[in-house]
Structures are given as structure tokens and as C-alpha cells.
Amino acid sequence: MPSKYEEAVYNVLTDEPATPNEVAKRLGINYKTAKDALMHLAMTKKGVRYKGSSKIHLFWREEV
């Protein structure tokens, strides 16, 4: 189920990789909410990319 913050999270993403913590701080929401919205976007929206490496999660937006 999409989060009510999904559109705001999507608009914060740029072509520069960002962590869920950075996105959460920009929007004033908690880490889990940001990470859940980012993961959902990465799975459902074309142009949202994800790279995970141990404890680091990076998300960015590509032009499609």
C-alpha cells in the first residue's frame, strides 16, 4: 500500500544518491517511513533506482 508521503519522497529524489535518513531529515519524517516509501517507489515506479550494500541503502531518480 502506498504511503501518504510517497509523492513528497519522490519529489525529494534527484539524480544524486540519497539515504533514507537524508530524505527523512529533508521532509521531517522518521527513518522507517522514508525507507518504506523509498522501497515502494523503487519497486513500483520506473526511474527510481536502489542500491543496497550491507547497512547502506541508496536511492536516486533517473529520467525515463
Image (cartoon, grey):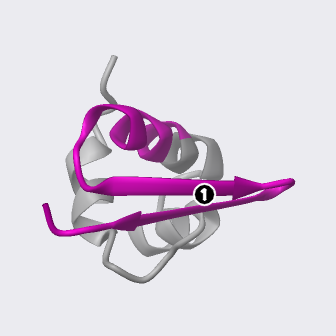
Mark 1 residue element: strand
Please provide percent x and percent y for residue 45. 24, 41
Give yes or no for residue 61 being in the magenta stretch.
yes
Quadrant of the rendered structure where residue 62 is? Answer: bottom left
Residue most extreme to the front: 64
> In this image, 2 relative to 39: left or right?
left
Q: Residue furthest top?
A: 1
Report whether 20 appears left or right of 61.
Answer: right
Quadrant of the frame with the C terminus: bottom left
Residue shown at the point (33%, 79%) measured from the top left: 15
Q: Which residues are magenta?
A: 36-64
Q: Where residue 6 appears, x then y in whole percent?
A: 29, 43
Residue holding disc 1: 51
x%, y% of residue 9? 33, 56
In this view, 4 is above or below 18: above
User: On the image, which quarter does residue 52 sit in?
Assistant: bottom right
